[in-house]
Image (cartoon, coloured by chain):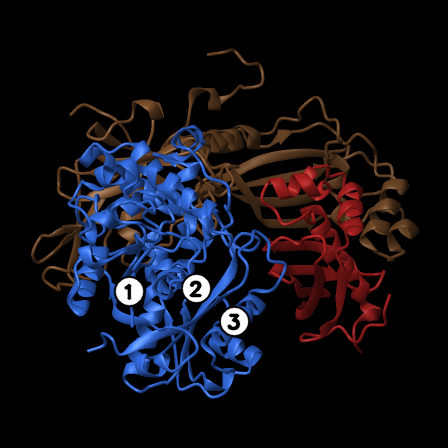
Amino acid sequence: MLSGRTAIAGIGATEFSKKSGRSELRLAAEAVLSALDDAGLSPADVDGMVTYSQDSNQEIAVARETGIGDLTFFSRVEYGGGAACGTVAHAAMAVATGMARNVVCYRAFNERSGRRFGQPNSRLTGEPTSQGLEMSWHVPFGLMTPAAWVAMFARRYMHRYNATSEDFGRVAVAMRRHAATNPAAWFHQRPITLEEHQASRWIVEPLHLLDCCQESDGAVALVVTSAERARDLRRSPAVITAAAQGSGAGQMMMTSYYRDDMSGLPEMSLVGRQLWEMSGLSPRDIQTAILYDHFTPFVLAQLEELGFCGRGEAPELLKDGGIELDGRLPVNPHGGQLGEAYIHGMNGIAEAVRQIRGTAANQLPAVAHVLVTAGTGVPTSGLILSAG
Amino acid sequence: MTGDPMTDGPMTDGPMTDEELHELADKQAALGEVRGVPAPDPVNIPMIRHWLAAMGDQNPAYLDKGVAPPAMAQVWTMQGPRATAKDRSPVDDMMAALNAGGYTGVVATNCEQTYHRYARLGERLTPATRFSGLAGPKRTALGVGFFATWNVTWYAEDDEPVAEMLFRVLKFRPPARKTTKDPYPLQPAINQDTAFFWEGVKEGELRIQSCADCGLLRHPPGPLCPHCRSTGRSHTVVSGRGTLYSYVVHHHPPVPGRETPFVVGVVELPEGVRIVGNVVDCPPEEVRIGMSLRVTYRRMDDELVLPMWTPGEP
Amino acid sequence: MTERGPVETGAVLPELSIDLTPTVVVSTALATRDFTPVHHDTQLARAQGSKDIFLNILTTMGLVERYVTDWAGPEAVIKSINVKLGVPAYAGDRLSFDGTVVSLEDGQVTVEIRGKVSLGDHATGTVTLTVPKEDEPC
């Protein structure tokens, strides 16, 4: 079994900005070196690398830049931000099976100053690949931005559970409140009110501007090694108690409109079931959850799919600050991607490590276990990290 | 009728059948040779010199002997750039009827000139045209068309024929007329598994894949039946009725080829599958989950038709 | 005008290549009094689906005549030109003629000619002519 055998021993990041002014490869190299320094390892110790399929920096290029030598394991994880925790899962498997000793996971991009994921891209249907064909049932109708794909689910969720835009807004308000006291967050000291959320312009109804996460330039890297080795390194280990990937029946990329009632995220339910089973834990054992928040409505669906509340009960959980720092389940103490930065979920894993170490800007008391999720609406992944 | 003075002749009566075109051809041929207007200028040195220079022809014989290059025969009787009195010939009605019948394309296929003698300086030539036949309709590389043939004879002042010409054109129906619409920027990728759907919407049919073996309907379509593994694919043309299952109103950012706001919905068909399409003919604020819809087809450019959904009776 | 070899069946005419500059296309159209816009107005020609302005038929006939008389000499008399028209000869292309004497009967010479452009045959056909007796091979 994988549980408990590996740990995250180092985390590193660049600053989070709207215009890094540097190449994506340089961002990747900076984050990787920073994570190695954090762990107290040298580039020569690294023999494995994992990143997202979407990352434009090949492992070999990052290795060359940082002085990493022989690699015995390298892997890419598919499906956009759904890859985030998957990179750690792959690294953990490699370490647990002896394929590699120290594996670096990274994500680096100029998503705001370079190619922006939220902009329409008519090349989505340029080729009759399986993905080009899948997109071809949606893009010709102008349904071609992540906000629009998510909005289709959000409308159905509202219809099914009588949820409102204010329910989604409470997520945005909580995230910005957390970011306000996180100096690394782009929205540091810039909280919003629910009224401001409601007054922000429509992007794709039922999503307001403030339901959509920001866009960022930056990079985050993590070092995965054996739990045993991690205990001998510089920082307290964040033990990987569970790691899982999940893709559901009838799965598509952001447009799984054809399989069920469209008010949930079956692939996240699948990830959750594995996490609970692998860790032997249950939702009440989690002190804080890092939930992927590129768009607010899917935070509600995740709370339900992971068992933090019943189906349709997320709006109730959100009321009265339920996911805020002093709430029933603090979610994204760093401010999430809505508040801190959009680094495709990788910054959330780093926050989970800080919460385990006890070094977070908005540190919660007595954190033993943190659940982390990756991109929603796509095949996804998750982790439970634990102190020890 | 508008009494438009620019339209006259058979074409005002609408397109002719193939048979009627042949009848008209016979009638025009029966007119025999019809004299045209004499050349505006007699055979002259300046036009010959101009013609030789343009052709790069350095043959001194013509000006030395006071004759015109024979290939100039038709040049003498060409209409000028501001021709007013149209020099009617038996060919004109035939061409007008072919145009009216949709055979608007024209390409010359044969030009055969016979020179009885070279025209001399000072002679004024007069053309005479005889319609000599219509063949078709025939399938050609350019499209279906008719070959029309006529003969022109150029006479000197004493009715002596100087030159003759057989001229044949293909009047063809151009393939599907290109509109000036810009190509729609959001084209679907299409392959052999999905082409039937897009061909269907072009013909006003909403085709949903059905398994030839177990009958399972599925959308979006694919190469196999996920239920019984059959590769035997068929499709059913569905009723075109549906119910709105979910929808969004897109405001921002701008989408190429679209004006915001626009509505995209997931439509549930009574046949049991869902399909995505735009909801049109309905203000966005009146769109509701559960509303009844029926399919409509919108042409986006010369090639692409998209199925869309308009409010309909349940 | 070039020196030609003996007029006999199988004799090959020297090639003639003409660069179809816009000036050639327009000046010949006007010299043949053909004012149809597709022979002088590039924009309009393109709007009607053509690649560019192209040679008019009266010019094709004139160039065929020139091609054969360039070879046959000033004493030749052209009796007929029969041309089958093929692909358009667009401005910017090059029109190359080749020809062969295919028969010689009672002083009447028949020459098969072909005018090629990059798209294929623009004109193919026959020209009949007479040449003075003294010009025939002895």
Above or below, comparing residue C15 to residue A150 in the picture: below
Q: Residue at 84% across / 61% down in the picture? A: C75
Note whether residue C112 is visible: yes
Q: Do labels 1 and 3 share a chain?
A: yes
Q: Using a 10 Å C-alpha cutoff, classify the residue at mark 1 as few (fewer than 14 neighbours), some (14 to 19) or many (20 or more).
A: many
Between label 1 and label 2, give the one nearer the viewer.
1
Tell me which amino acid carries mark 2. Answer: Gln
> Who's brown, chain-wise?
B
Query: In the picture provided, is A166 more to the left or to the right than C70?
Result: left
**What's the distance in space between the residues labelled 1 and 3, CA to CA?**
22 Å
Above or below, comparing residue A98 to residue B117 in the picture: below
Say which residue label 3 marks: A34
| Residues marked 2 and 3 touching at CB (< 8 Å) | no
Residue B44 image point, x, y percent = 87, 39
Residue A15 image point, x, y percent = 55, 59
**What's the distance in space between the residues labelled 2 and 3, CA to CA?**
22 Å
Q: Nearer the viewer, residue A63 or B108?
A: A63
Between label 2 and label 3, give the one nearer the viewer.
3
Query: What subunit carries mark 1?
Result: A
Say which residue label 1 marks: A383
Q: Nearer the viewer, residue B199 or A224?
A: A224
Residue A203 image point, x, y percent = 43, 36
Q: Which mark is residue A23?
A: none
Q: Using a 10 Å C-alpha cutoff, classify the residue at mark 3 as few (fewer than 14 neighbours), some (14 to 19) or many (20 or more).
A: many
Shown colour of chain C: red
Tell me which amino acid carries mark 1. Answer: Leu
Q: Residue at 42% across / 33% down in the picture? A: A193
- Secondary structure of residue under mark 3: helix
Q: Looking at the image, is mark 1 or mark 2 earlier in the sequence?
A: 2
Shown colour of chain A: blue
Above or below, comparing residue B81 to residue C18 in the picture: above
